Amino acid sequence: MSGLTPTRLTRASVAIVGAAESELGQCAPGTTPVDLMAQATRRALDDCGLNLADIDGVFTNASQLRMPTLSLCEYLGLKPRYQDGTGIGGSSFMTHVQHAMLAIEHGLCSVALVAYGSTQRSVSRAAASPREWNPYESPYKPFMPATAYALAASRHMHQYGTTRENLAAVAVAARQWALMNPVAWEKEPLTIEQVLAARMVSYPLTVRDCCLVTDGGGAIILTSAERARSLKQKPAYVLGVGECLSHASISNMPDLTITGAAQSGAIAYAMAGVGPQEVQTAQVYDAFTINTILFLEDLGFCPKGEGGRFVSEGWIAPGGGLPVNTSGGGLSYCHPGMYGLLVLIEAARQVRGDAGQRQVANCDVALAHGNGGVLSSQVTVLLGSGATI
């Protein structure tokens, strides 16, 4: 990772001050993605004690809307001084955090809203997120995106001896966390055997190795660290951000066992001035069980090739040494198409200390990692409590 330097942002200059989900699961008939974004926005504003009129920066992305920022601003009656609709898949919202930091630091806005909404369960995933034709892959009729992630899983198994039981341990840990989350979709315990016996989707991934298909959305509010200290909630300071775009199609991924998280994490750690050993909880985008294993390795929590052993030893489950995806993750909590914003919400709650039964003790540093496409875009955000400033 030679040559990597911290991004030109000021550590902890900005904080997440409000965080909320919209309704999750399956929404009422007629609900739109903008309805969910607006609902989450209102809840996030209530969370921090700010008003709609305070928002002067808007950051959105949504697979069901052509111009989501315009749609949300019209719906809420906002006329922002700054807006951003960057779309790089499920990690878009981590990049929005970075862009909001830049905008706030340079006076382009003072209160930034990052929002997302999806009704993919109600309208079907295919309608909500249509696949683009790829002339080098589509003729072979892959079942995307599962097939792409199955390729990564198969290669990791071949190269490092990772087993299907290792993959299943990720799903079981996520379910154990979900059972502590009142709004999680899944309400029943899960075993390794049940994961292995579930319907095969794309070998070696069964349906229990794959994320949920739910409706839902979320919103976070960011402002300057100075203003954050006077608001309703404890701030979750943005300590570091890093990103890496490595490919678009899975056939162009340089190495199926190494993701761009290795680079995005290194940049974020350098900016934050911390290392993996100082992270008390990691919230990573677990669209498939292989994701968690790959990201734990690439973000420095265990050596490359040892992610399977790490999860099977119980490190990421309740009571383990590194609580991972404490909400239940995309595997058991919710997954409304692009899940990255929900990862940020859980990380902020853990740093603030208000995650309820699933709260990680003495959580001063939380990592939130977003993934977009088919392991294509990787963005890492490190959040810290007041003790880190």
Image (cartoon, rainbow, N blue to C red):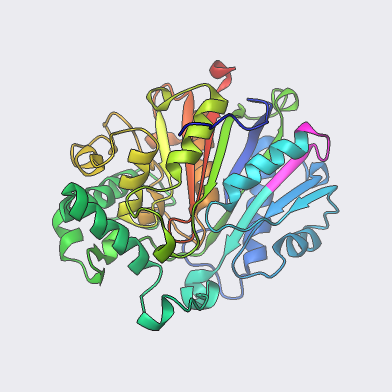
**Residue 19 placement, left or right of 303:** right
In this view, the residue in front, 90 or 228, is 90
x%, y% of residue 259? 40, 48
x%, y% of residue 57? 78, 46
Quadrant in the rendering for residue 203: bottom left
Farthest residue, direction front: 2
Q: Which residues are magenta?
A: 105-113
**Residue 235 placement, left or right of 106:** left
x%, y% of residue 172? 24, 49
Quadrant in the rendering for residue 262: top left
Image height of 124 relative to 37, above or below: below
Whether residue 354 is visible here, answered yes or no, is: no
| Image quadrant in which the C terminus is located | top right
Quadrant in the rendering for residue 89: bottom right
Q: Give the residue at x 70% y 63%.
A: 68
Whether residue 320 is visible here, answered yes or no, is: yes
In this view, the residue in front, 258 or 36, is 258
Q: Is residue 386 magenta?
A: no
x%, y% of residue 271? 57, 27
Q: Give the residue at x 28% y 28%.
A: 321
Q: Give the residue at x 30% y 63%.
A: 151
Image height of 46 relative to 247, above or below: above
| Image quadrant in which the N terminus is located | top left
In this view, the residue in front, 285 or 354, is 285
Image height of 236 relative to 244, above or below: above
Q: Number of numbered discs present?
A: 0
Q: Is residue 110 magenta?
A: yes
In this view, the residue in front, 255 or 364, is 255
